[in-house]
Amino acid sequence: MKKLFTSILSVVLLFSMVGSVFAESKKVNYEYSSALVTAAQLDEIFVGAVGVDGEFLVLDQQKAINNGISSDKIKEAEEKIKEYNKITKDVLVISPLLTFVGNQIQFDEIAAEKKGVSKELINATKIDVEKINKAAAEGIVNLAACGGTNKYEDRWYGFDTYFDSCVSNQIIGYLTIGVGITTIASLVTMAISPPAGMALGIAAGLLTIGGGALTVANAYGCGVLIRWSFDKPFWTGSQC
């Protein structure tokens, strides 16, 4: 699980463009259970038993039992979901402390200390901010705002994601410098605001596609369109 969540910057950014901190509890939504199960690195047998309540993952034990899942596997899944939700909580605490200034990210360390944020999280955030700002200064990553088509659309076969040429180049840059999957998820969230809990699954798919294929798809300068069969990308091409 630690390999999945390798970048705290992703933790900071993941929900930074989604709205108010700590979404109110809502009825648990299981619509995107397949993608959520993939994002949390759970076995496919948990599909239908994992949903989202506000911004946090929820496991319905009774549904899991009805699916024939053993108590040991349920306990293991609960531990993974607990870690996933802890990272989500960190995101919601830290995200208001990040601002974009031109092509750089600024982190308000003093405000973080006043809010009681742990030194470990503050230091990890500072390291990630420095890494991405360095890449931005070298032209590897472009953080500047850019117009174009960025959106998420539900389809009968799953969903489509549209990234304009600038966001596509940012994704390619992130893949090039090897940032963590959750940092990529943060960019996905900021660009297209997918349903709660799905950004990490989309980020995992982008890692599967790879920078080379995305570069080819973005070669015409009009952005990238990716079609998904729920949690798996099956077609990547240009928006032209």
Image (tube, grey):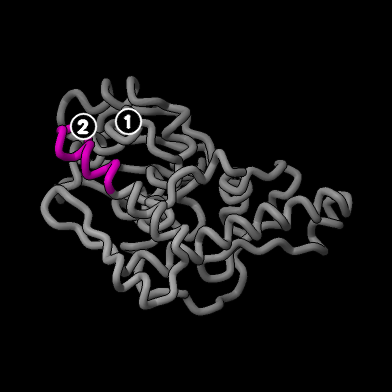
| Residues drawn in magenta | 130-141
Asked whether 50 falls inside the magenta stretch, the response is no
Front residue of this view, candidates 172 and 68 = 172
What is the spatial separation of the Cα atoms under label 1 and label 2, in whole angstroms?
8 Å
Q: Residue type at mark 2: give it.
A: Ile
- Whole-percent x and y of residue 225? 32, 35
On the rendered image, what quadrant is the N terminus found in? top right
Taking 40 as reference, is 224 above or below it? above
Picture residue at 43% right of the left edge, 67% below the top: 92
Picture residue at 71% right of the left edge, 42% below the top: 44
Q: Main SS of the magenta segment? A: helix
Image quarter of residue 239? top left
Picture residue at 45% right of the left edge, 50% below the top: 199
- Comes first in the chain, label 1 or label 2: 2
Q: Is residue 197 visible?
A: yes
Q: Is residue 156 visible?
A: no
Q: What residue did someone put label 2 on?
A: 140
Picture residue at 37% right of the left edge, 72% below the top: 113
- Whole-percent x and y of residue 156? 50, 45
On the rendered image, what quadrant is the C terminus found in? top left
Report the side of 42 relative to 145 (left or right).
right
Front residue of this view, candidates 20 and 160 = 20
Asked whether 139 falls inside the magenta stretch, the response is yes
- Whole-percent x and y of residue 184? 38, 43
Report the side of 57 relative to 122 (left or right).
right
Taking 67 as reference, is 228 above or below it? above
Q: What residue did someone put label 1 on?
A: 177
Q: Quick one: SS at disc 1?
A: helix
- Whole-percent x and y of residue 237? 31, 27
Q: Residue type at mark 1: give it.
A: Ile
Taking 17 as reference, is 166 above or below it? above
- Is the residue under label 2 in contact with that under label 1 (CB below 8 Å)? yes
